[in-house]
Amino acid sequence: MGRAFWIKRFLFVAFVAFAVLTTVELLNGHELAQALSFALGWGVLASAVFTATRIYRSRKGQHCAICNDIPEPKQ
């Protein structure tokens, strides 16, 4: 899995986390600017931790069936 795969994975997780956190903050009655800044910070942090953990485990040979990152067998 190359660098592009991990960048795409990071951006996808960051976007999903950002959307969920923004929605939750707005439902809790926070201002839009405050909700966006909160969601951006925590979304990027959460996706960085998730991606770093997946890279570490991938290098150790532990693949995640839920994440669908099991490499194709080489023939």
Image: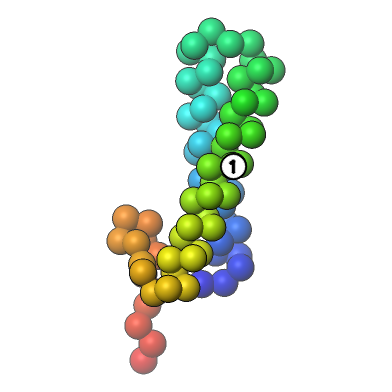
Q: Residue furthest top?
A: 29
Instruction: Judge whether 41 appears above or below 26 on screen.
Output: below
Residue 24 position within the rendered picture, expressed as x and y whole percent measured from the top left: 48, 20
Instruction: Examine the image and state in which quarter residue 3 appears.
Output: bottom right
Residue 24 visible from this viewpoint: yes
Q: Is residue 15 visible?
A: no
The residue labelled by disc 1 is: 45
Which percent across, then down, holds residue 48?
A: 57, 49
For the point 53% across and 42% down, the residue is 46
Which residue appears at 37% of the width and 57% of the height? 67
Badge 1 marks a residue whose secondary structure is: helix
Seen from the viewer's position, the closer of residues 32 and 47 is: 47
Residue found 63% across the figure and 11% down from its top: 31
Residue 47 lies, in percent from the top left, at 54, 46
The structure's colour scheme is rainbow
Q: Is residue 32 above or below residue 45?
A: above
- Taking 46 as reference, is 18 above or below it? above
What residue do we see at 58% from left, 11% from top?
30
Question: Quarter holding the C terminus?
Answer: bottom left
- From the viewer's side, name the closer residue of 26 and 52: 52
Residue 33 image-quadrant placement: top right
